Amino acid sequence: MGSVNDHLASVARQLGKEVAEPEGPVFPEPLRYLWMAFLELMPRRTSGMSANPLTYTELAAWSRLTRTPVVPWECRLLMRLDDALMVVLRPKPKPPKGKK
């Protein structure tokens, strides 16, 4: 994975103009390994009508099969990240007919 500057330079080349660094909090580098684990787990979730939340069973299986130990606070953080993602992915309810 490239750095933010690498990505910005790539976007600038593609657009043919300079791109400002996005505003926002600085990524907590000591936690990058957990973000990478979350990104690895995300596309492997089950789905029906929409994406289902990550389960403890799936996380435990991933941990065992990849030989990636996960301590309790890391497990809780991964689940909280997944909870936040589910809020974003959850389908928005449609208003009743005749109402906006």
Image (cartoon, grey):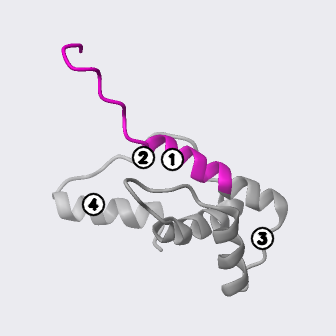
x then y, percent, for residue 24: 51, 40
Residue that label 3 marks: 70
x then y, percent, for residue 6: 40, 67
Q: Is residue 52 left or right of residue 9?
A: right
Name which quarter of the figure residue 53 lies in.
Answer: bottom right
Q: Are marks 2 and 4 in contact (CB under 8 Å)?
A: no
**Residue at 72% from the left image edge and 73% from the top image edge:** 60
Give yes or no for residue 51 being in the magenta stretch: no
**Mark 1 belongs to which amino acid?**
Met
Label 3 sits on a secondary structure element that is loop
Estimate the spatial distance between the alpha carbons at disc 1 and disc 4, rounded to whole Å.
Answer: 29 Å
Residue that label 4 marks: 11
Name which quarter of the figure residue 32 lies in.
Answer: bottom right
x then y, percent, for residue 20: 35, 46
**Residue at 76% from the left image edge and 61% from the top image edge:** 74
Q: Residues within 10 Å of mark 3 (few under 14, many from 20)?
A: some
For marks 4 and 3, the one nearer the N-term is: 4
The total number of labels drawn is: 4
Estimate the spatial distance between the alpha carbons at disc 2 and disc 4, rounded to whole Å.
Answer: 26 Å
Q: Residues within 10 Å of mark 2 (few under 14, many from 20)?
A: few
Q: Which residues are magenta?
A: 79-100
Indicate which disc residue 89 carries: 2
Q: Residues within 10 Å of mark 4 (few under 14, many from 20)?
A: some
Q: Are marks 3 and 1 in contact (CB under 8 Å)?
A: no
